[in-house]
Image (spheres, helix red, strand yellow):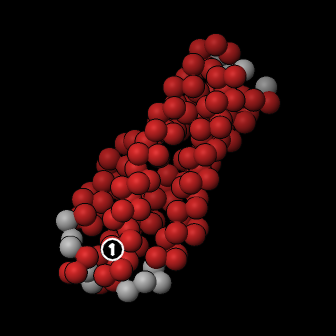
Amino acid sequence: MILGQLAFFAAALFTGAAFYINAVEQPARLGLDDHALLAQWKPSYKRATAMQVSLVLVSFVFGFAAWIRMDNPGWIVGALLMLANIPVTLRLILPVNKRLMAIDPAEAGPESRALILRWGSLHAIRTGLGLAASTAYATGLLA
């Protein structure tokens, strides 16, 4: 059962962090001028990347291990939902990230603001995946 609890814990941490970004950090930074907006987004993105990737992988590994041990579909569903963050990020979000990272904050303007707005919408997918994974894991914990 400890494997499932660790999977759930990592997924819940991921979901909380992702939700915080969408509900608090993104709206706050959108109140900045274009230059400050991009200047704030860049280091925030870099710092969050390591944490989010780690939580996805930890949650997946523990969820997969819990599924092997307990053969409850909640564990594999949660693990796969957490893992889905990787292709979503690589396919949808990374191209936007690369474009934003290539813009010098001194040259920020309407295009960079529009990209950050798009980034926020795409990031909400990760929040949803984390919430869905946490819910699936919860079914495993309650079984």
Image quarter in which the C terminus is found = top right
Looking at this view, name the residue that lies furthest to the bottom.
Answer: 33
* As drawn, 25 above or below 94: below
- Write down the residue under mark 1: 38
Residue at the image point whose x is 31% and y is 82% from the top: 35
Quarter holding residue 77: top right
x and y, in percent, of residue 7 in the image: 61, 31
Residue at the image point whose x is 65% and y is 35% from the top: 8
Viewer can see residue 133: no
Q: As drawn, is 102 to the left or to the right of 91?
A: left
x and y, in percent, of residue 130 in the image: 57, 46
- Crowding at label 1, few (<14), some or many (≥20) Cα neighbours within 10 Å? many
Q: How many marks?
A: 1
Front residue of 41 and 134? 41
* As drawn, 76 above or below 13: above
x and y, in percent, of residue 121 in the image: 45, 65
Residue at the image point whose x is 52% and y is 75% from the top: 27
Element class at badge 1: helix
* As drawn, 136 above or below 129: above
Viewer can see residue 18: yes
Q: As drawn, is 108 to the left or to the right of 73?
A: left
Q: Amino acid at mark 1?
A: Leu
Looking at this view, name the residue that lies furthest to the top.
Answer: 69
Q: As drawn, is 53 to the left or to the right of 101?
A: right
